[in-house]
Image: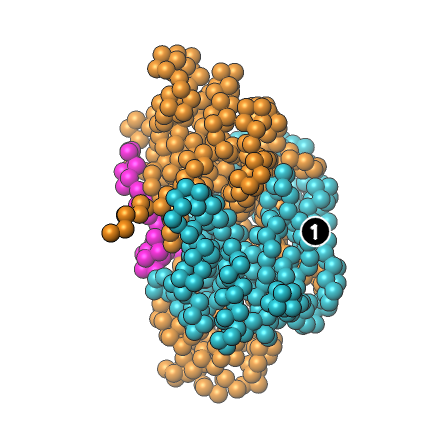
Chain colours: A cyan, B orange
Amino acid sequence: MVSAPFCAKVLAELGADVVKVEPPEGDSARLAGPFPGGRPHPERSGLFLFANLGKRGVTLNTRASDGVDRLHRLLESADIFVENQAYSTLEAAGITAAELELRHPRLITVSLSPYGRTGDYREYAGYDLQVNALSGMSFGTGHPHREPLTTPDRQAGFLAGLGGAYAAIVALLARESNLAGDGDLAGGQYIDVADSGVISTLLTGYHLPTFIYRGIAGSRSGNRMRLGLFPNCVLPCRDGYVCIDAPQMEQYQRFLNLMGDPDWTENPRYRDRRAMSDQYPEEAEDLIAPWFMEHDKAEILQLCLENRIPCAPVLTMAEALEMSHLHQRQWFVESEHPEAGGYRYPGAPVRLHGSPGRVVRPAPLLGQHNADVLDG
Amino acid sequence: MAPERSMPRPPLHNVRVVDLGSAWAGPMAGHLLADMGAEVIKVESRARMDGMRLGRPMVGEDLAGGDRGLWPELQPVFHGLNRNKLSVTLNLRTEAGRKILQRLASVSDVVLANFSPGVLERLGMDGASLRTVKPDIIVASMPAFGDTGPLRDMVAYAPIIQAMSGMMSLVGYAPDQGEPLVGELQAAWSDTVAALCAALGVVAALRHRNRTGQGQYVEAAHLEGTAALLGVPMLEYQMTGAIPVPPGNDDPDFAPHNNYPCAGEDSWVAIAVHTEEEWKALVGVMGGDGSVDLSLATDARFVDKSSRWTNRRELDALIAGWTRGLSPQEVTARLQAAGVAAMPVMNIADQFADPHLNARETYVEIDHPHAGAEMVYGVPWRFSNTPGSVAAPAPLLGQHNDYVLRELLGMDETRVSALVAEQVVY
């Protein structure tokens, strides 16, 4: 669905020849949408088109033994195998860590799964919603009086996929340096990446010590960052929303200057920025909210850029797609798909200026490269 | 008898990184490389300390307190972000300090930084300056918006990047649920994305160098990394013409799909149903204790995914009626036994106590000379043959000055003492 396809998409962007393997009925992402005009079509799913950009595609039935054999033949020539299948599917097809190591000692397997391939939850069912639940992202997101919110558009899976791509290249370097050094190591290995593990580690650097040393286990705090310095919140402006996060005194002072140094800044109650953030945030936010309501997003961006204030409009996806900054940096990728049409896709997550990646083809049609890859 | 094979070295054992990072994203990119065995040398100075070392620490007595005292060694957030590194103190405000930094780069593979655009050039640490001393150097930088473009000088922290990427516009309750935009995630999301992007770019550049002999410049702009994960809502807008709004916990590919209230204060369980099989299993479990009528499975309102999606608010109310009397653990155990995706919505206390996360070494203990035994987050990629690890605590300020200056750069004791006296090594 998300983590493994996106992991391999990032590798494709870096120049890898990626072959997407689907069951005969297709990756279930083909049914997930969004779709042009809202009409489902297996060759027009936005999730599938994005997560599989730049790959070739084949179909294999790994529920049948000849399909498993063909997969193993494909793995013979591969450097990296990326998968996020259910535990039971892998066991049934015999594509386990032990089997892969035995049959393909040089192969690097990146196994992405919601909970990982070890531990009590390894066979549990899970989707991005459960990953966000287990990893602590949901608990802190949303209003205190409402239900917790998962990250939008399966962001946990995309982040885990990015992590998987990093791990894959690290393993490739290990294989090459160990081959050069020790000689007797085939160099392949099995990398177990839990989507929830990526979030539970890399996004808890603040929460973990805050819990251990202060006993604070977290809570939702809606439109404001918890345990910070005022102002650190999202507020409405004339034509949408704006986000301000100005921890340094000079930044905050420049913002007050921009507001015309209002009288309330003389009040001692409004000089303790920690108390304003932790104890009476709504009252504090009411002091700056009117200024934002007098300005629109474009004005706020320009003023804050000129005055070096960390404050910016909350862009809609439509505005982000038109951002002249990203266009001047030639970041977006325009790609034409034979069934779905031409669309603007996000560019690469990182730029290698000496060996830039590029997208050489759109996402594959179902089984498009069967003849080239499987029979060739 | 076969000769005993030595333990394989960690994957990046032959890579040396000069880490000029500060705050969050830069240090995290450095530790991602250090976790996998790279020798990462954090360059810092009492003249301009990493802000994460400053302020009243959460841990320990502050008898010897103050930013000039022991506080800089007692910051647990810093300890997480800088584990596995070495520290050398170089005052980069001095010409001599910048010279030594260049020499250090000349015996290293990678220079890593998260400065604003232009600072690397001023320090003489950009690719063009360094190629004369180290032709195949890899310089990786993490500007907020990038080195070019009209927003290159925009001041930003993670929430600002999330706002400008469009991601923030999607964090909130669905419009029919009547709340203003939430926006904020209580975590440094875009810093984490940028750190991973920089680490990814560095290892990809190392492989390119190993094959071609050529170094290069790697640019991991926070904005681009964050927006690179947003292909779906970008395509949604282009494909439907509708500007994406916060989905709340809705996902049109699932129904039901929500966090449901359980017994106890602020207690929730995440339940998601993708297939017909899962739907029947959910109804079976809910009906098993008599809470719900089993005919629900064939109720016209919920008979297939598209009906369930259309009637999802009604369905949510029915499910919440069942979950409200149970603990999240109980709901999870019952549903998972029937093959339905469920998980308690955990806070950090729950995570810290969770047997599964513990079995996978999500949080690991490390001994710090001043803070004592402390917990930091572990390494999320579990390699079968050449694993990474949290092998060493974050360094003390200048803890490895001798190693760096004398062993790596060949200075004698007299020279080092003179540099200390001149506050170049400071």
Taking the spot 61% from the left edge, 50% from the top edge, the residue there is A15
Nearer to me, B146 or B104 = B104
State the residue position of label 1.
A333
* Residue A364 drawn above or below residue A239: below
Taking the spot 56% from the left edge, 36% from the top edge, the residue there is B213
Taking the spot 67% from the left edge, 52% from the top edge, the residue there is A359
* Residue A297 drawn above or below residue B153: below
Nearer to me, B194 or A275 = B194
What residue range appears in magenta?
A: B347-376
Residue A35 lies, in percent from the top left, at: 68, 67
* Residue B338 drawn above or below residue A271: below
* Residue placed furthest toward the left: B1
Q: Of helix, strand and loop, which one carries label 1?
A: strand
Residue B384 lies, in percent from the top left, at: 38, 54
Residue type (three-letter) at the residue carrying disc 1: Val
Q: In which quarter of the image is residue B214?
A: top right
Q: Can residue A172 be seen in this view?
A: yes
Label 1: chain?
A: A
